Image (tube, rainbow, N blue to C red):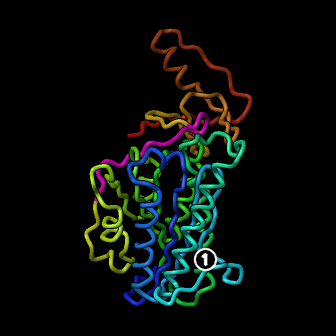
């Protein structure tokens, strides 16, 4: 793996959480947060003319690409007082988010069952971000260092755990950093793991206490791969690495692990629901019988079995 150079361009994919239900409880309004994010994006584009940008927006129902857009179909008024790229990005992102917020209010029904109102389709957004990164990197001859910045306000969705962890490890293999800016609510267990595994930063902004989201982003997330090697990034010593069970999608402290496919379950089961392996409990029964003084020879299993291990998660 080559080392980043000062002259290497960057690709930044911004993922905006535009869940109206989550933002309605936040002390920072979605409009104010978007204005600060647009300023940060403009600062990123001003650092180097070769820098590339992708902006995605996601809520409970959908994930859309707001930028880049087809210039031929875009209707944006010209303003000679504003730098062309800044104007296009600002107008496109703000109008796109407004359209998604308006569309969410008018949508009837729930196409994503299991995702609560205050949750966002984050795994879908990160997967789409990695697809954009792969396409840009493949179409560019020079080395491009990529990273993802997530602006999050919604809660975790336990049903997304499997797909989200797959996306996180895919980003790690692609050397893509994932920075998280959490502006409301409690810490996100899944996004904390995303930042830690990929080498990014997890930032909890206390907007109710007067902390500036823009200032936090400027001093922590604006630096590229090359600059981050000489900067001291903020550390997080209280990362929650608990997993979610595959059966009920609950965060567990102690779980049972399939020795074949490593699926995690909150309750002991005779058959793995993921790989259909039949578990053997002969050892546990033998030890129990021996302790009671009534050890008997257990019958041979009819099919191939595997042991189910107990995993303590801290």
Displayed quadrant of residue 275: top right
Residue positioned most to the left: 232
Side of 157 where 64 appears, left or right: right
Magenta extent: 235-249
Side of 135 where 179 appears, left or right: left
Q: What is the x, y in percent for residue 164? A: 56, 53
Examine the rendered structure and indicate whether residue 162 appears above or below residue 35: above
Q: Quarter of the image containing the C terminus?
A: top left
Question: Is residue 245 in view from this perspective?
Answer: yes
Which residue does the numbered mark 1 point to in the structure image? 68
Examine the rendered structure and indicate whether residue 301 appears above or below residue 258: above
Q: Residues within 10 Å of mark 1 (few under 14, many from 20)?
A: some
Q: Nearer the viewer, residue 311 or 197?
A: 197
Examine the rendered structure and indicate whether residue 176 appears above or below residue 238: below
Side of 65 where 94 appears, left or right: left
Examine the rendered structure and indicate whether residue 308 appears above or below residue 42: above
Secondary structure at numbered mark 1: loop
Residue at x-position 61% and y-position 42%: 115
Q: What is the x, y in percent for residue 290? A: 48, 15
Q: Nearer the viewer, residue 157 or 304?
A: 157
Displayed quadrant of residue 117: top right
Residue positioned most to the right: 302
Main secondary structure of the magenta stretch: loop
Residue 240 on the magenta span: yes
Q: What is the x, y in percent for residue 157? A: 55, 44
Residue 294 on the magenta span: no
Question: Is residue 259 in view from this perspective?
Answer: no
Displayed quadrant of residue 249: top right
Side of 101 where 186 appears, left or right: left
Q: What is the x, y in percent for residue 62? A: 65, 55
Q: Nearer the viewer, residue 80 or 101?
A: 80
């Amino acid at each position: 793996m080559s080392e980043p150079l000062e002259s290497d361009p960057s690709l930044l994919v911004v993922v905006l959480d535009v869940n109206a239900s989550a933002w309605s409880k936040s002390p920072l309004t979605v409009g104010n947060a978007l204005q600060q994010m647009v300023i940060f994006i403009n600062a990123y584009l001003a650092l180097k003319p070769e820098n590339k940008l992708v902006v995605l927006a996601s809520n409970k129902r959908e994930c859309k690409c707001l930028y880049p857009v087809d210039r031929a179909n875009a209707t944006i008024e010209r303003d000679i007082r504003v730098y062309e790229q800044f104007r296009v990005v600002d107008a496109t992102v703000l109008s796109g988010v407004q359209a998604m917020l308006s569309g969410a209010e008018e949508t009837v029904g729930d196409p994503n069952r299991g995702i609560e109102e205050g949750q966002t389709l984050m795994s879908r957004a990160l997967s789409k971000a990695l697809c954009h990164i792969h396409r840009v990197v493949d179409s560019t001859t020079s080395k491009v260092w990529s990273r993802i910045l997530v602006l999050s306000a919604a809660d975790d969705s336990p049903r997304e755990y499997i797909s989200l962890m797959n996306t996180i490890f895919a980003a790690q293999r692609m050397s893509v950093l994932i920075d998280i800016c959490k502006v409301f609510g409690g810490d996100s267990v899944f996004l904390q793991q995303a930042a830690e595994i990929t080498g990014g930063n997890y930032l909890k902004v206390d907007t109710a206490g007067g902390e500036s989201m823009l200032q936090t982003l400027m001093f922590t997330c604006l630096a590229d791969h090359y600059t981050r090697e000489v900067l001291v990034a903020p550390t997080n010593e209280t990362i929650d690495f608990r997993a979610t069970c595959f059966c009920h999608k609950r965060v567990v402290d102690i779980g049972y692990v399939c020795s074949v496919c490593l699926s995690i379950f909150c309750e002991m089961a005779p058959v793995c629901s993921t790989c259909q392996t039949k578990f053997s409990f002969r050892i546990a029964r033998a030890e129990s019988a021996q302790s009671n003084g009534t050890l008997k020879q257990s019958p041979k299993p009819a099919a191939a079995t595997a042991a189910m291990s107990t995993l303590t998660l801290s």
